[in-house]
Image (cartoon, helix red, strand yellow):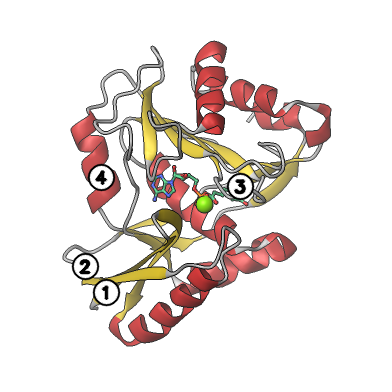
């Protein structure tokens, strides 16, 4: 089957507004472009004045993966966002102080210029050292999507919680967590009004965190936590080149925070 990657990036002036991507069969390319352009025009960060679309034939068969298991915290309001983040990351062996440092860095704009990065920082879980080669840009996960049938099951699974940010984020994180050497991911949206983020942990899944940042906060970012032996070249290669398609969903549960910590 001939599969194509369709990517969209939009900006207003020099400012990046949004990006999204799909992997589809050739016949679906035109309608996919149209849907991505509508999305760019309707983005809450502002209507784009420039939208770029890139269409490429995939040279490799995508790796097929099940979606990460998703959990949500039932008693979210009993804890501070910071505490939820560090206690989850502690399950991946990451020290509290390292987690808090990264969390705060993402919230203030993790690029050395004090703005958001386009990609993710890559952090050694043991030492907290940032190893991405370009700390302005970071490492980008790309070439990933869900099959139509997995998307249908995903909508049924998450019901009213469905939105495009959520859909794209679980797919991205499924790719990221399946990378050799990656132990965990922390994500905070840079959209001022999208305050749901997540921590994903290898072997556990995607933990959704409502109110991971304050309302109307225009910064955010992602951190990929890797083990001591991980090489940045192989992490980057996998993230930026290997195509992944999610072809089935797992589960979506509401658990107490203690319940999540004991998974
Ligand atoms: N690869 C690596 N990092 C990325 C990528 C990518 N493809 N796309 C974005 N980032 C980084 C970049 O630094 C952004 O500033 C940051 O992540 C946030 O991106 O309801 O909306 O697209 O469960 O604003 C997560 C929660 C929503 C979804 C995430 O991220 C849910 C979101 P945004
Ligand atoms: Mg955004």
Of circles 3 and 2, the one toward us is 2
Under 8 Å from ligand 1: the CB of mark 3?
yes
Circle 3 is placed at which residue position?
70
Mark 3 vs mark 4: which is more N-terminal? 3
State the mark number for residue 58.
2
One can see residue 207 in this view: no
Seen in the picture, residue 109 relative to 54 is either above or below; the reply is above
Query: CB atoms at circles 1 and 2 under 8 Å apart?
Result: yes
Query: CB atoms at circles 2 and 4 under 8 Å apart?
Result: no
Seen in the picture, residue 230 relative to 72 is either above or below; the reply is above
Circle 4 is placed at which residue position?
238
The one of 38 and 15 positioned closer to us in this rendering: 15
Q: Residue 223, how many percent across, how many down?
A: 44, 33
The one of 85 and 17 positioned closer to us in this rendering: 17
Q: Residue 11, how many percent across, how many down?
A: 42, 61
State the mark number for residue 3.
1
CA gap between label 4 and label 1 equals 19 Å
């Amino acid at each position: 089957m001939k599969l194509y990657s369709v990517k969209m990036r939009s900006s207003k002036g020099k400012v990046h507004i949004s990006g999204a991507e799909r992997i589809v069969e050739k016949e679906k390319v035109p309608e996919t472009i149209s849907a991505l352009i509508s999305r760019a025009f309707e983005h809450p960060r502002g209507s784009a004045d420039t939208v770029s679309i890139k269409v490429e034939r995939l040279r490799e068969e995508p790796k097929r993966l099940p979606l990460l298991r998703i959990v949500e915290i039932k008693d979210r309001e009993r804890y501070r966002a910071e505490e939820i983040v560090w206690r989850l990351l502690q399950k991946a062996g990451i020290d509290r102080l390292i987690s808090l440092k990264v969390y705060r860095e993402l919230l203030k704009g993790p690029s050395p210029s004090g703005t958001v990065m386009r990609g993710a920082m890559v952090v050694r879980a043991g030492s907290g050292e940032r190893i991405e080669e370009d700390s302005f840009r970071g490492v980008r996960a790309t070439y990933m999507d869900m099959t139509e049938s997995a998307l249908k099951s995903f909508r049924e699974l998450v019901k009213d919680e469905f939105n495009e940010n959520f859909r794209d984020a679980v797919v991205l994180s499924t790719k990221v967590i399946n990378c050799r050497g990656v132990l965990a991911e922390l994500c905070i949206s840079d959209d001022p009004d999208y305050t749901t983020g997540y921590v994903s942990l290898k072997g556990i899944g995607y933990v959704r965190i409502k109110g991971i940042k304050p309302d109307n906060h225009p910064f955010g970012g992602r951190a990929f936590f890797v083990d001591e032996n991980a090489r940045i070249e192989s992490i980057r290669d996998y993230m930026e080149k290997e195509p992944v398609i999610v072809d089935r969903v797992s589960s979506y549960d509401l658990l107490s925070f203690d319940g999540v910590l004991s998974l």
